[in-house]
Image (cartoon, rainbow, N blue to C red):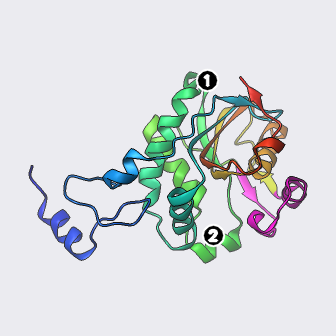
Amino acid sequence: MKFHPVTVLLDLIYPPKCVLCGKLLTRHQREFCDSCRKTLPVCDEKLQRTAVFDGVTAALWYQGTVRASILRYKFSGRSHYSRCYGRLLAAACVRLPLENVDAVTWVPVSRRRRWRRGYDQSKLLAVALAKALDKPLVSTLRKTKHNPPQSTLTTPEARRANVLGVYTAVDRAAAGKRLLLVDDVWTTGATATEAGRTLLLAGADTVWMAALARSREFKENEQVKPC
């Protein structure tokens, strides 16, 4: 196997590490170490329907090294993880009727959070997913209210109240479209549901949902059913 000189130099300066556990990778490993690749907690839930979404799917369970990895991605500048995450998400999206999807969009963060982090993590996921699926990417929502982080709230009711009315549709960007909405983590589904509801009110034909990871913690409170 041949290696490009620039790639070799970058690997010497910034040794590639496992996206999940952070261990240094060997030459034959890509993105994941062998141990993490073998134990990847793939979310095996069937496609599910809600009052807002025609179907909800997720790539991974939000636990252990996956949770630690996503926290690094969101809060420690690991924006490059989005390329790997996008491929994982694309694999989960085979459960969806992709022929019925016109475009990929995302659940945006507020301007303040984007400024603090330097990027919108869900937008980066959507960019990677749209590329993997060969679908157009479209901006359909703005977050117009800076609400407290959902992670600070402990009940589904509080999470739903916290996100009520925080999104505004972008002009007529959603009108008549069959959209695939992307977010990083589905916990109770409150955030994504409010975003999806806003899209439907803005004239979207249908909305599907794809999350990088899904929490088991609040599953008993989710109003979902198999498609």
Residue 45 or residue 144, whichever sits in front? 45
The image quadrant of residue 150 is: bottom right
Horizontal relation, residue 92 to residue 210: left or right: left
Q: Which mark is residue 67?
A: none
Q: CA distance from mark 2 to mark 1?
A: 31 Å
Percent coordinates x, y for residue 52 in the rendering = 80, 35
Seen from the viewer's position, the closer of residues 111 and 15 is: 15
For the question of whether residue 117 can be seen, the reply is yes
The kind of residue on which mark 1 rests is: Asn
Identified at 89% across, 59% down, the residue is: 158
Name the image quarter holding residue 75. bottom right
Chain part drawn in magenta: 141-166
Q: Which residue is mark 1?
A: 100
In percent of the image, x 54 and y 64: which residue is there? 68
Task: Classify 177 as above or below 167.
Answer: above
Q: Which mark is residue 114?
A: 2
Residue 41: x and y, percent?
A: 51, 46
Give the mark nearest the N terminus, 2 or 1: 1
